[in-house]
Image (cartoon, helix red, strand yellow):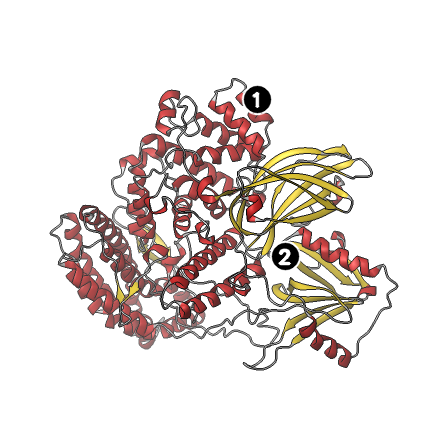
Amino acid sequence: MQSPAPHVSLWSAAACFKPTDFNYNTDGYDGDGAEDGKSQDSSETLPYIDESPTMSPQLCVSQGPDGEAISPTPLEGDVEKGLEMKKLVLSGFLASEEIYINQLEALLLPMRPLKAAATTSQPVLTMQQIETIFYKIQDIFEIHKEFYDALLPSIQHWDEKVTVGHLFQKLASQLGVYKAFVDNYKNALETVEKSSQANIQFQKICETVKVKGPKESKDCTTTSSMEALLYKPIDRVTRSTLVLHDLLKHTPKDHPDFPLLQDALRISHSFLSSINEEIDPRRTAVTTPKGEARQLVKDGFLVEVSENSRKLRHVFLFTDLLLCAKMKKTAVGRHQQYECKWYIPLADLTFQTLDESDSCHSIQVLPEHEIEEMKMKISVLKNEIQKEKKAPKGQSRVERLRKKMNEQESWLLLHSPTIPFRIQNKHGKSYLFLLSSDYERSEWRESMQKLQKKDLQACVLSSVELQVLTSSCFKLRTVHNIPVTSNKDDEETPGLYGFLHVIVHSATGFNESTNLYCTLEVDSFGYFVSKAKTRVFRDTTEPQWNEEFEIELEGSQYLRILCYEKCYDKSMLNKDDNEIVDKIMGKGQVQLDPQTVQSKNWHMDVIEMNGIKVEFSMKFTSRDLSLKRTPSKKQSGVFGVKINVVTKRERSKVPYIVRQCIEEVEKRGIDEVGIYRISGVATDIQALKQAFDTNTKDILMMLSDMDINAIAGTLKLYFRELPEPLLTDRLYPAFMEGIALSDPAAKENCMMHLLRSLPDPNLMTFLTLLDHLKRVAEKEPINKMSLHNLGTVFGPTLLRPSESESTKGQHITCASDIWSHDVMAQVQVLLYYLQHPPISFAELKRNTLYFSTDV
């Protein structure tokens, strides 16, 4: 399956999720482009023009038997709503068209004096250079000015009889002018660059092109560069094509516009296909292995940081040395082989301390939202694979989808680990691995330390010995594949999807009093992640935590518990955000058996670790049950009670519980790492819930004493248990349609219109929460919570319908039900508003139509 080129079109920068796959660098399973001497072609190429219909998974264009795009059509009975949506799309497009015309006019402005100067004794540019730079701009300007002048009265006098299809058809028929512009685009840019370097006067002209603002705008002019403005026509073709998709979606088939818009879309698609470059696929399937030799003690896949980039390595621990290898690239049909990157005799191997390694490596960590977005993509692919398996002729498509999912899961394994594991050859170089789990890091370290207790002699391998040992790794490996879904047999258990409730009761078996706490890890998408942490029990040999946690499972099969001794040595703290300096006292894991866990009753268990016993209980709740909105039988409380009932009773604009939780989080939780993402103790959250429901007098005292994660959890629970989502059931379909619009200006109009349609208590509460979440995200460098992270946490909570007809009576068992198309869109909706400039209640109610100034 061919991978699309990176999109450069400007509309995609405003989108919540990128419409294309990530372009990761995982050649084989390693991603070592530089090491193999195969540098990527860095020569300048024409920007790729995106012809995908939309960012939204809900608006994928189907294809007819001849491969032509068939646009979706509205359902019968939705004509009136379709007309309103069509007007919103056109209004937004018209507003952006005005800005585009102003940009073209700004480009033409310096052309005339430059031409005049070209005939003098002191020309700034030659006539040839001017013709190259401004080629076809005048023609494009005239085409769009004529289009704008014809479309404006149609929208001003809008009704069901108005037709605009002929205007778009005419616009599409003139795309030949754009073809000529695109063919010359690279020459134009090169001429601008060379002329700027040669002439300071022209350089100033290029850097300060004045662009008029739209008529409605208070800001009269903006400044842009000539290079940026020259790109606008390329971006405009994509924009026009996207608008055609949106218009067709909201135009009835029997409307006179329908065949004309369809024809315009066909011409646009044909044009885009003719000018897009064919991009060779940069990725291959990711395969990997495991080993045994000399004797092999342990092997597995680890991410190494080498030359400031991440490489997926196969690491082999033998009885006397540690060998780090990568799979060599071989021709199809050739025997696969490993290549040794380095080895360290165990006699010379040491574990670096923080101080020793501070200057050795810088760990580059991707924003968490990119990791979450990839999880969403993988889950959607899993769902598609399940559907295709049931289809009569779906097998060939299943293989293509599996290959794509393999690539995406491999990318996730490469980029998700953040816990450093540093080792060094005491006579030479140091190395850095990144792991996702402290449990895993501890296993590797303990295995090496156990072997080092033997009387080891330092060994130096000759090149022949090293080659023989490396070759044997292929047969000796014990881990044959990287732990991705696509490498598993269909018969293997898919794991659990839903919520695991765990109570960590107590621990025994400690020889002396110390400060103790536990962390909980579960596997997800092929690797383990830490999900919860108990409070520290001070100065004891028998800690009694009795804390309950709710852990989200995404195809999980194991629960791990690690018991730590807390380090209070100030000199060891805060050396590295991802470094864990506390000492592991013991660790263990249990398999999550669906039959045992899925009963309604708590299942009690004990994990034994190094003479220590940790007692815990757990039970599992499927996602459909845990997310069901159930109205409260008691209307006197606040949880499970309609928001307008609560605000009316309290005589407030925003419920008291929302105001108080936000105030407390902003007072002492805004710097808390993982605020709103880290689980609060379930028993604390239930105590706060009861206090708010019964209007306890000492609620303020409870809030000031309570762990901040419990308060954050209480606020999330309040929105989750509303009998109807904050953004309402009635408007849910419209929010899904609005976020799916491709044109930013149309989307702006629609999304603001929907906010105005909310009941006042819902709108005031939403805007209050929105402002709060933006303030939390401002502290992202400290709390690690970006707008994307907060959108992922709150999106489904604020939008998920109370009950969908399509899901009634169905049980949710598939991976994609956690990151389904709907959930992705719900996250996108909240993210749209989070990324939007401040929205005031008064201004929102005053304005009847928003026009975007962002093109």
Image position, residue 127 (x, y; %):
31, 75
Q: Is residue 389 left or right of residue 581?
A: left
Q: Is residue 290 visible?
A: yes
Q: Is residue 687 above or below residue 249?
A: above
Q: Residue furthest right?
A: 455
Mark 2 vs 1, N-terminal side: 2
Residue position for label 1: 701
What's the amino acid at mark 2? Ile
Residue position for label 2: 363
Q: Secondary structure at mark 1?
A: helix
Image position, residue 800 (x, y; %):
39, 42
The image quadrant of residue 478 is bottom right
Picture residue at 74% right of the left edge, 60% below the top: 423
Q: Is residue 20 left or right of residue 126?
A: right
Q: Is residue 49 above or below residue 535?
A: below
Q: Is residue 342 above or below residue 542?
A: below
Q: Is residue 837 left or right of residue 560?
A: left
Which quadrant is the C terminus positioned in? bottom left
Q: Which mark is residue 716?
A: none
Residue count near mark 1 (Cα–Cα under 10 Å), binned few <14, some 14–19, many ≥20: few
Image position, residue 160 (x, y; %):
13, 49
The answer to whether the residues at label 2 and label 1 have Cβ atoms under 8 Å apart is no
What's the amino acid at mark 1? Met
Which quadrant is the N terminus positioned in? bottom left
Picture residue at 28% right of the left edge, 74% below the top: 180
Q: Nearer the viewer, residue 190 or 49?
A: 49
Q: Secondary structure at mark 2?
A: loop
Image position, residue 633 (x, y; %):
40, 26
Residue count near mark 2 (Cα–Cα under 10 Å), binned few <14, some 14–19, many ≥20: some
Q: Nearer the viewer, residue 47 or 393?
A: 393
